[in-house]
Every structure is written in structure tokens, then in C-alpha cells.
Image: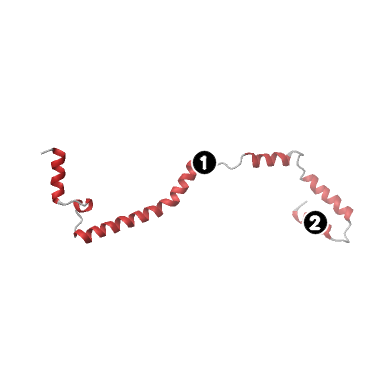
Amino acid sequence: MDRSDINFFLISSLDADADLNKVNQEMETVTRMYDFSDSFKDRLLEKLFSRGLEVNPQIEFLKTISWAFPRIALTGVAAIILLLISIYIMEDSFSFNTILGLSESYDENIITMLTGN
């Protein structure tokens, strides 16, 4: 019995003039062909709902990081660029001392403090 026969019987079962006994017999034949055991429904529901929601924390963490990292990295790079531009505007150079906020006199003082001379 193919799909068109099943559709025919379903549609004819809705027709008031159809022979209901014949339709019922055909439908019983179809249901016997696709008959499951009595405990099939219970076993299926048990398998579906017994596991619950399994969440792997490592995978969830990596998904969150992979979503958030580009946004955080982009704003961090923008902040660093703005900081370098502001240092260049204030000091007119990009030396290591200007980035740290030191001048030549501070270098000598730090060396004196560290060495004790």
C-alpha cells in the first residue's frame, strides 16, 4: 500500500457517502502494517526526556569567547590607537619614554634608585 492509497482512505473517511465499514477495514490493515509494540511509546519518551539538557561547559565557554573576542579586541585596538595618537600630539614623538610617561631626568633618577649610586 503506497502513500496515495493512504491519502485516499483518509479523504474518503471524511466523506459522508463513503462506505465506513470498508474504510475502517482498510485503515485497520494500514495500522497493522505499521504496528509498534505496546511499550514503544514509553521507551521512546524515556530516551528523549531522561537525558535532559547536556551542556559541556568547555564548549559553551569557547562559543562565548569566539563570539565576544572580536568585539573586545576591536575596541582594545581602537583604544590603543587613540592613546598613541594622544601621546604623539602631546609629546611630538613615539619613543619608549614618552609611551611610559618618562623624561630623561626620570631615567637618571630610576637608575640611581636601583643601583644606589
Upstream in the sequence, badge 2 or badge 1? 2
Other residues around mark 2 within 10 Å, as few (<14) / some (14–19) / many (≥20)? some
Which residue is under mark 1?
56
Residue ID at (89%, 53%):
21
> Residue at coordinates 29% horizontally, 59% vertically from top-left?
82
Measured as percent of width and height from the top left, residue 103 is found at 16, 52
30 left or right, relative to 84: right
In the foreground, 114 or 15: 114
Colour scheme employed for the rendering of this structure: secondary structure
User: For the residue marked with disc 2, what is the amino acid?
Assistant: Leu
Residue under the image location 15 percent in, 41 percent down: 113
- The residue indicated by pointer 2 is 10
- Image location (x, y in percent) of residue 85: 26, 60
Q: Nearer the viewer, residue 42 or 57?
A: 57
Amino acid type of the residue tagged 1 in the rendering: Asn
Query: Disc count in the image?
Result: 2
Q: Which dot, 2 or 1, sits closer to the camera?
A: 1
Q: Position of residue 1 (x, y in %)?
A: 78, 51
Give the residue at x 16% y 48%.
106
Q: Nearer the viewer, residue 106 or 23?
A: 106
Q: Nearer the viewer, residue 27 or 68?
A: 68
Q: Where, by quadrant of the figure, is residue 35 drawn?
A: top right
- Tell me the number on the disc at residue 115: none
Q: Residues within 10 Å of mark 1 (few under 14, many from 20)?
A: few
Q: Say whether residue 95 is left or right of residue 6.
A: left
Name the quadrant containing residue 77.
Answer: bottom left
Measuring from the top left, give residue 96's x and y in whole percent: 20, 51
- Alpha carbon separation for disc pair 2 and 1: 46 Å
Image quadrant where one finds the C terminus: top left
Residue 8 is left or right of residue 95, and the answer is right
